[in-house]
Amino acid sequence: MIEKILFPVDFSPSCAAMAAYVRRAAEIFGAEVSVVHVCDLASHNGFELLVRLPQEVADEHWSIAEERLQSFLASEFPPSACPRILCAGDAAAQISEVARTGGFDLIVMPTHAGRFRSMLLGSTTAKVLNDAGCMVMTTEHTETKSPRPLEHRVWVCAIGLSQDSERVLRLAGRAAAAVGAQLSVIHAAQEEAALDARRRLEELLGKAGCGAAIEIAIGPVKEALLDAARRCAADALIVGRRPHEGGLGRLRELTYSLTRDSPFPVLSV
């Protein structure tokens, strides 16, 4: 299901800390990893422009980025086995385009400590979540410590009852099966609607051909879903994005808030 993973890097400590996590994701999916860096060729200072032409400065920045990309995490991801991709422009747009044209199945995004939780909206990660057509995996970690290893014992899928739910369940079932994880499905509902929600979920699981335990979480949607995931001791949380970008993008408000606040790795499909 997932054969090609794209790992965007900006040479920061958080990217270095993410290496073991990405290697573990590649291991459990049996996938190959490509490392991409987006170079900002316009990031020059006034002094550089006083002594050289803008194109000369841009060429030098490209050469420096190319050299750094080849050596960055070379022991963890040998360039001979893990292709390096260098491009220039808007980071989120370039990452999404590389994922599309390269036929990547999953983007594993490094995040930058507290900034990811407090300022996700408008960040490169949020833009990729909004624009990328493939799956995106994110996790919480600090600048100096590696994120906890991705495991595959219990994966939880937060699901609604919309036209897109069957697609999300199919992908969740395939992802969990691919790594040998036990899948649970969680739906948030008011108490009076719990029985009907369970019935409809059972029908959806049958249509999707997905075998999973069902839990109906009572209460406000985001809090109920995350509390239920904690009780399941989830190793990963699967959430759905809009399948087509459209005018509003793929990133729903609930998907955004779950990704921002989840204590678990989040696989956005």
Image (cartoon, grey):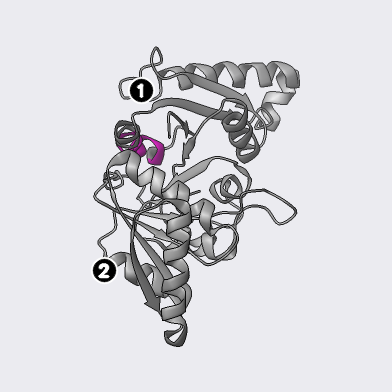
Which is the main secondary structure of the residues drawn in magenta? helix
92 up-or-down from 77: above or below: below
Q: Quadrant of the N terminus?
A: top left
261 up-or-down from 180: above or below: below
| Marker disc for residue 77 | 1
Let me know if residue 63 is in the magenta part.
Answer: no
For marks 2 and 1, the one nearer the N-term is: 1
How many numbered marks are there? 2
- Image point (70%, 15%), residue name: 56
Kindly give the residue lying farthest to the top in the view shown: 80
| Marker disc for residue 231 | 2
For numbered disc 2, what is the local secondary structure?
A: helix
Q: Are marks 2 and 1 in contact (CB under 8 Å)?
A: no
Amino acid type assigned to the residue bearing label 1 in the image: Phe
- Image point (66%, 16%), residue name: 59
Give the magenta part as a residue range: 14-22
Report the front residue among 217 and 68.
217
Amino acid type assigned to the residue bearing label 2 in the image: Arg
User: Where does residue 81 sit, x and y in percent of width and height?
Assistant: 38, 15
Q: Quadrant of residue 55?
A: top right
Residue 57 relative to residue 190: left or right: right
Specify whether residue 219 is in view: no
Check disc 1: other Cα within 10 Å, few if <14, some if 14-19, many if 20+: many
User: Where does residue 97 sit, x and y in percent of width and height?
Assistant: 64, 32
User: Where does residue 216 sit, x and y in percent of width and height?
Assistant: 38, 74
Residue 81 relative to residue 68: left or right: left
- Image point (63%, 45%), residue name: 131
3D distance between C-alphas at marks 2 and 1: 35 Å
